[in-house]
């Protein structure tokens, strides 16, 4: 898996062991559901992922120094539906649901995000995780185009320019809160995190001028990453609907 080798500091032996295990998993993989393109099970750092896209997100998170846990627990949503999120990011109070191209089914992730959000006013949140825990949806990499984003419909030209520059070349993600989330390094704790409120998710540092993160804030060092490429023959997802 050449896509992983340029990310992180993996030793050669570990990488070979992962490749051997990946080959074994793919030989034995039984395609379930009605997906036209099956996803490719992939082993990365001895963890078996359901798809190459998920493994590439794990490598991307490693390159950012963001601690992750893969499929840590099945949760029961308020509607009674059971849901198995892809990643928990315990040090920044966030979750990441990985989705392939096409028409991703994101209803469960959105319901999960709503159930974890707090009701505090935006600038008066006192929760451990600013705004409550955050659920992000990770899509395959593509440049951010504010011109085509509903959220930027009524923003002035210069605001779109700045937003496009800050987002340019990122893997795509969507906050299930329908607000922007910005990936950057916190000026106080130096950790990489998504910012979607005036506070750092890791250390709660209150950002200066964070009323509009994309326009007023010069504190955050925005991170540009291209993410690992999605293999053409990988659907990126296979809904692991847990048994009720
Ligand atoms: Zn709160
Ligand atoms: Zn911080």
Image: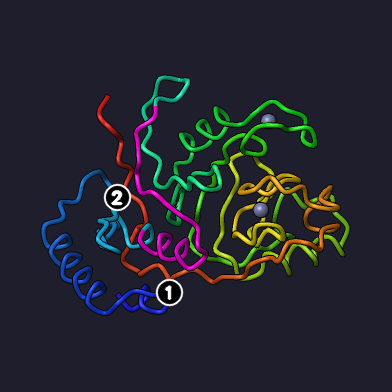
Q: Is residue 34 left or right of residue 77?
A: left
Q: Is residue 220 left or right of residue 96?
A: right
Q: Measured along the vertical axis of the image, is residue 177 above or below residue 1?
A: above
Q: Which mark is residue 35?
A: 2
Q: Position of residue 22 (x, y in %)?
A: 20, 65
- For ligand 1, give the image quadrant: top right
Q: Which quarter of the rendered picture does the N terminus lie within?
A: bottom left
Q: Which mark is residue 56?
A: none
Task: Please name whichever residue, 169 or 200, is drawn nearer the observer in this view of the structure.
Answer: 200
Q: Position of residue 7 (x, y in %)?
A: 43, 74
Q: Position of residue 77 (x, y in %)?
A: 44, 25
Rendered image quadrant of residue 132: top right
Q: Alpha-carbon distance for marks 1 and 2?
A: 29 Å
> Which residue is the site of mark 1?
7
Q: Is residue 90 left or right of residue 160?
A: left
The residue sitting at 36% across, 77% down in the picture is 5
The residue sitting at 77% across, 52% down in the picture is 152
Q: Secondary structure at mark 2?
A: loop
Residue 177 colored magenta?
no
Q: Position of residue 193 (x, y in %)?
A: 60, 55
Task: Please name whichever residue, 232 or 194, is drawn nearer the observer in this view of the structure.
Answer: 194
The residue sitting at 46% across, 48% down in the picture is 103
Q: Secondary structure at mark 1?
A: loop
Task: Please name whichever residue, 126 or 155, is drawn nearer the observer in this view of the structure.
Answer: 126
Q: State which region is magenta.
A: 55-75
Mark 2 Cα-neighbour bin, 10 Å: few <14, some 14–19, many ≥20? few
The residue sitting at 43% across, 71% down in the picture is 229
N-terminal of the two: label 1 or label 2?
A: 1
Residue 71 colored magenta?
yes
Q: Which quarter of the rendered picture does the C terminus lie within?
A: top left
């Amino acid at each position: 898996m050449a896509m992983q080798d340029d990310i992180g500091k993996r030793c050669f032996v570990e990488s070979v062991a992962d490749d051997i295990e990946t080959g074994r998993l793919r030989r034995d993989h039984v395609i379930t559901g009605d997906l036209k393109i099956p996803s490719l099970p992939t082993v990365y750092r001895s963890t078996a992922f359901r798809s190459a896209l998920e493994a590439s997100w794990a490598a991307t998170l490693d390159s950012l120094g963001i601690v992750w846990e893969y499929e840590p627990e099945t949760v029961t949503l308020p509607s009674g539906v059971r849901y198995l999120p892809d990643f928990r990011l315990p040090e920044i109070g966030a979750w990441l649901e990985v989705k392939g191209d096409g028409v991703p089914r994101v209803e469960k992730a959105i319901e999960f995000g709503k159930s974890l959000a707090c009701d505090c006013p935006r600038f008066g949140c006192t929760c451990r995780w600013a705004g409550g825990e955050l659920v992000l949806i990770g899509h395959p990499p593509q440049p951010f185009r504010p011109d085509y984003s509903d959220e930027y419909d009524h923003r002035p030209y210069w605001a779109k320019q700045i937003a496009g520059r800050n987002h340019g070349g990122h893997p795509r993600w969507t906050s299930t809160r329908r607000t922007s989330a910005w990936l950057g390094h916190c000026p106080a704790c130096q950790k990489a995190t998504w910012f979607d409120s005036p506070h750092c998710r890791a250390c709660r540092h209150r950002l200066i001028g964070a009323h509009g993160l994309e326009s007023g804030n010069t504190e955050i060092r925005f991170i540009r990453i291209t993410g690992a490429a999605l293999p053409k023959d990988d659907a990126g997802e296979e809904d692991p609907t847990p048994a009720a």
